[in-house]
Image (cartoon, grey):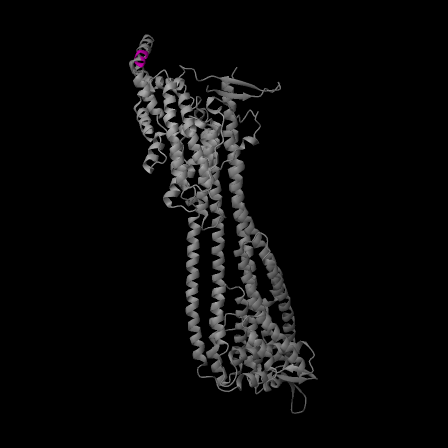
Amino acid sequence: MSTFSIQNRLRTISGESTRIIKLDHKYSGFDPRSVPAINLEELNSGIYALRHLMNALQSENTNVAALLNPNNTIFPTTSWTDYKHSRPQASSPRAPSSQTPTDIVSAAALALVLVIDGGLAELVASVTEIDLGALSTISTVRQLMASYLGLTTLTAEQEKVVFSSSYVPSEKNLLEHVKQEKAAEIQAKQEEIKAVLEAKGVSTEEIEAILKEYPDIYAADFFKEFIEEPLHTYRAKVGAPIQEMNENAIQLLPTPPAITPDNVNEVNGMNTLSTILQAIDDAIKQAPALGGDQEIITILQTLVPLVDKTTFTKAEFDLIYTATQLPNTASLKLYLTDRQIAEYRGKITKVYQNSIQNLSETKRVVENNRSMLETQLSMFQQAQNCFVTWISQANALNIAITNKYISAVLTTSMEMYGGLLCLSYMYERLADDEKAIFDKSVNEYLPIHIVVGGSWVNGWIAKMAAYQELAEYSLGTAVTSQDQIKAYLQTRGNEFKATRHFFHNIGDQMYQFANETVFGNCLTTANGAIQPDLGGFIREAMTNVGTVEADYVSNAQRILNEFNTAATAHVLQLQLQIAELQKKADDLDPGKASFTENRKFAVAAWITSESLGDALISMILNSQLPKQEAFLKPLIEEINFNNLAANALNSLLQITNEFSTTSVYYSLSSYLVQSKTGQNLFAGDYYETLLAAAREREYIYRDTARCKQAINLVNGLLQKINSLPGATSAQKQEMLNATTYYQYSLSVTLNQLTVLESLLAGLKMTLQTTSNNKYDKSVFKIESFDDWIPTLAALESFLTSGFPNISATGGLGPLFTQVQSDQQTYTSQGQTQQLNLQNQMTTIQQEWTLVSTSMQVLNGILSQLAGAIYSN
């Protein structure tokens, strides 16, 4: 018996009372499976707004009945039971794992032959008020099944016939048969109704409309009273082998693999298929007659062959997602309660929500991988540029050595050492295939001879490295013997071999340089202590070295060309991979999913079938909140990362802030160039100039200490980056690359400071006297090696602007600029994301205002409805 009830807990009496309004009287014309008796949309348009609100928010389902007070008077959950759900539910045997989907379908078809044959006979016999045996579809099926009795196997065509016969007769056939068999009785009733209506003065048009509808009404009432229950009994018998087929198919479902961007669509398809089959199984257990319904049988015929698949074609995906729209609500209402229909629809909606989450998560993975590749490409291109500018110095070195350009040969030699040092740091951030490109080219270039019978490239770099190391050591330590310096160079050479790629042979040759005859020319003694002699080093180790090999430059160019070919191909490959990942990320956009329209239908069907209170609460708890969390979480993580990165660079920026004015206090050469009056003579005050030189050396000590402090900070930062909370691998890699820049820039800058100090330490400044042997305040003398003023100007410019010819510039000024830029970038990104977060929070607040308003509308609707029903 269909009922419409409202549970009403009395406020002054413990316990519960239920008032029932009967709306299914035989002559009331009320169909409990059609439109609700009270049109709530007409009662208050707020219901319409509520449903569209939930559709707009793309609700996911959860069964929130457990969250509700069962005695709640605002969101009632009415339950009722009739014969359709009171049948015992027998458990079905599970299929052995050796079965295939084809085996399962064949077994079900064979079982159905007996069930259909005997079941139809019982159906015809149980309905005595009308002769169902006269129905052509029943008689035809019985004859077919009789011909299949005794067969042990069926062909594919015979199986199709059996399955299509299993849902005969249809409700439509039975209703038409009733109207044909009861035509005389229907006509007599129509005449009675016509006479009554004419006596009441009803218009002819209204009478004709009522009489036209009456055969359908009569057939429906007759069907419900005499045929429905026997038919459902028959459907339940047919449903037994159908359910067994379904459960056996469920046993064959493979466990979905871990989700990756490459298999997310397949995993979503497998999960959806599994959910459909399991939801059907649960529904048949609740209403066994459902297993004999045409749509259920058709769905399973389509899906069971797919159960052992782990990949699907587009057509198979379409079959799976189309099946989520079935059975239609009218079919489900024949067997299930509204609560059970809502549960069925809810399971489908839930798997769609999981599919959306899977797509969102894998899209984030793909976007992170794309960002990783973009960061990798950026680092590779930096290393590529570094190599190109480094090896391109071959021609400049050739010219400098050949023409004995002192300043130029020192500049080029320092750049060669600095460039290789930079490459060794960058090498740590490259991928294996990228390392192979650099290994081939760098290791091919290093053993090439620069000077006939003299240094190779690695030997030349080893000399420059050895000088910078001995200069730093002797200027900072009281050294009294060359053996101390040799031991130090051996220690540092071993450290280079152990820590810096490409420096294995260079580390050995640094110590070998200390045993060469020219080594002594790189040192001088002052006040009993050994000091570096930059002029002697340039003269004996850099210029007076002989003739440059004729093929040195051409060999360097050949290696460069080969490198460019390999590097260009690799860059193109990375760009293609980035484009592919971008396309994959676009394809994984949940808004573009192939099942979007199916999902919209599933969500709308669930909202329609679910009680409005449950649907709204489920939307809030299980869709809106998780969706907002999924959106806000990466945004907040991005803000946290930018803040962490900016704060980490704040400390480095505090150290390097003073580097912003290097051009002001590294300017001795500018003064000397302007005041030069003759050979080693300069106009100006001797003591002021002496003080200026001493002050510049003091700046060098201070900045050297700051660079070493910054190196310690950077090394500590490198260790912290990998454990940064809330940072993606791409973000970490980006920061690691930036920190690597600081590492090699600081190392190169320290070397620049050391060489400058060694030049200043070797300057010999003397007073000049007048003809009467008095101190001449207008002129003084400075002596050093040839071209020392251009060399001083070059070394000072390195600190203010970096090396001029290679990308690994070093320099205090460029280092400050880069740290400041990075810190401002992270700060700006953090501020931008915070503004974005504020905007999103405003939007979310507006959404919740809409939800709150809708809840108030719902409360008003229910209050008005309750007041209208219980006005007394």
696 lies above or below 822: below
Query: Front-most of 524 and 19?
Result: 19
The picture quadrant where one finds residue 188 is top left
Between residues 777 and 48, which one lies in front from this camera angle? Answer: 48
Residue 502 on image: x %, y %:
54, 72
- In this picture, is 231 found above or below 269? above
Residue 576 vertical position relative to residue 274 in the rendered view, above or below: below
Q: Is residue 186 magenta?
A: yes
Find residue 667 and report its image quarter. bottom right
Q: Is residue 747 visible?
A: yes
Which residue is more in the foreground, 650 or 185?
Answer: 185
Classify 153 as above or below 174: below
Apparent side of residue 169 relative to residue 394 in the rendered image (left or right): left
Picture quadrant of residue 197: top left
Query: Residue 12, percent across and down?
Result: 62, 18
Q: How many marks?
A: 0
Q: Is residue 62 magenta?
A: no
Percent position of residue 380, x then y: 48, 65
Taking the image as drawn, is residue 56 in sight?
no
Helix, strand or loop for the magenta stretch, by majority: helix
238 left or right, relative to 488: left
Q: Which residues are magenta?
A: 185-189
